[in-house]
Amino acid sequence: MKDYYAILGVSREATQEEIKQAYRRLAREYHPDRHPGDKAIEERFKEINEAYAVLSDPEKRARYDRGLLEGQSFREEDLFDLFAQVFGFRRGPVAPRGEDLEAVVEVELQDLLEGKEVEVAYSRLVPCQACGGQGGRRVACPTCGGRGVVESYHRGFFGTVVNRTACPHCKGQGFLLAEACPICRGRGRVAREERVRVRIPPGMDEGQLLRVPGYGNLGPGGPGDLYVRLRIKPHPRLKRQGADLIYRLRLGLAQAALGTRVEVPGLKGPIPLDIPPGTGHGEVFELPGEGLPHPGGRGALRVEVELTVPKKLSKRARELLRAYAEEVGEPVAPEGFWEKLKGFFRK
Ligand SMILES: [Zn+2]
Ligand SMILES: [Zn+2]
């Protein structure tokens, strides 16, 4: 790992202000514009910016101090942008990267057990073949002479200050279209249907995004990224709760009172489960390791008992229940009571 403190020449206890001051001094000294063609200086300049990008961000700095910041890769334009940000001016035109895109992919709950490779179909913008991505016939912008930036000079404390801004006429592009391409209507890009295979990791969460670098729209500065959003098809019998799965087991009165053996729909197939006699409504049986994978292992399958009371009973079933009620001393309504009551209200 590079020693960012040494690169900026500050101590590990340096304050944010000291870091910023060191950076301003070094970045000015090593700016490639002052040493045209010197590769060593350019490398040093990049290092200085990289060090500042990390140390000026308290969160990144803390992670770096603990040795946790993994080999972060900085894009060259980002480092130059950082310089521009600190010194408060804009560089010339930067070829913009293509836009990021989002696509939705739907998987079954079972697919999350071991992960799954899926094909994502989506549409992205690519350079128009007809005009080679130029958008038509281009002419240099007369306002900025094709440079994309306009400069204004004013005298400041340290001498003449050059203020560069994007050319308002060509919006910083440096050119204007003399004739638009009929295929892309001057946009330089057309939509193309794409397919990309991505691997859904085990236990991935609904709504989570999976980044597929380089599969976004194509821009002059390279492609953007594609983000795949995960949607999980509802399972007919299981509900997901983090890494746990919930199954509502419906039990009849006799089953709950006398005990039974049932089959619970596990993700890999039915799992036998013994229900002991005297199981009550709302009781939960936990099957550890039968849920979804998570970093520490697998969640549980939780079986929640739902006691169902019959709405309609045969004459014989009523008689048996009545005998049962008598046996255990539960007072119940006499035979025919409810029919009589209904008749009373109808009058
Ligand atoms: Zn212009
Ligand atoms: Zn075109």
Image (cartoon, rainbow, N blue to C red):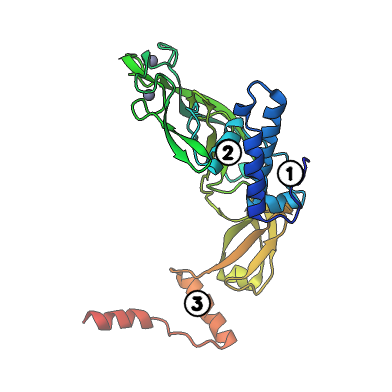
Q: Which residue is mark 2?
A: 83
Asked if one can make out residue 105 in the rendered structure from this viewpoint, the answer is: no
Q: Which of the 4 quarters of the picture holds residue 111?
A: top right
Badge 2 or badge 1: first in the primary sequence: 1
Q: Are marks 2 and 3 in contact (CB under 8 Å)?
A: no
Camera-side residue of 345 and 285: 285
Label 2 or label 3, whichever lies nearer to me, is 2
Dividing the image into four quarters, tell me where ligand 1 lies: top left
| Image location of residue 60, percent across then percent down | 66, 49
Q: Are marks 2 and 1 in contact (CB under 8 Å)?
A: no
Mark 3 close to ligand 2, CB under 8 Å: no
| Image location of residue 331, percent across then percent down | 50, 88
Q: Tell me the residue at 47%/85% (across/down).
A: 332
Q: Are marks 1 and 3 in contact (CB under 8 Å)?
A: no
Residue 87 — which label?
none
| Image location of residue 79, percent across then percent down | 60, 36
Q: What kind of element bears circle 3?
A: helix
Mark 2 and mark 1: span between their CA atoms?
16 Å
Indicate the amino acid at tag 2. Answer: Phe
* Crowd around label 1: few <14 · some 14–19 · many ≥20 (10 Å): many
Indicate the amino acid at tag 3. Answer: Glu
Q: Which residue is mark 3?
A: 319
Q: Tell me the residue at 56%/88% (across/down).
A: 329
Q: Which residue is mark 1?
A: 4
Answer left or right for 214 relative to 268: left
Q: What kind of element bears circle 1?
A: helix
Badge 1 or badge 3: first in the primary sequence: 1
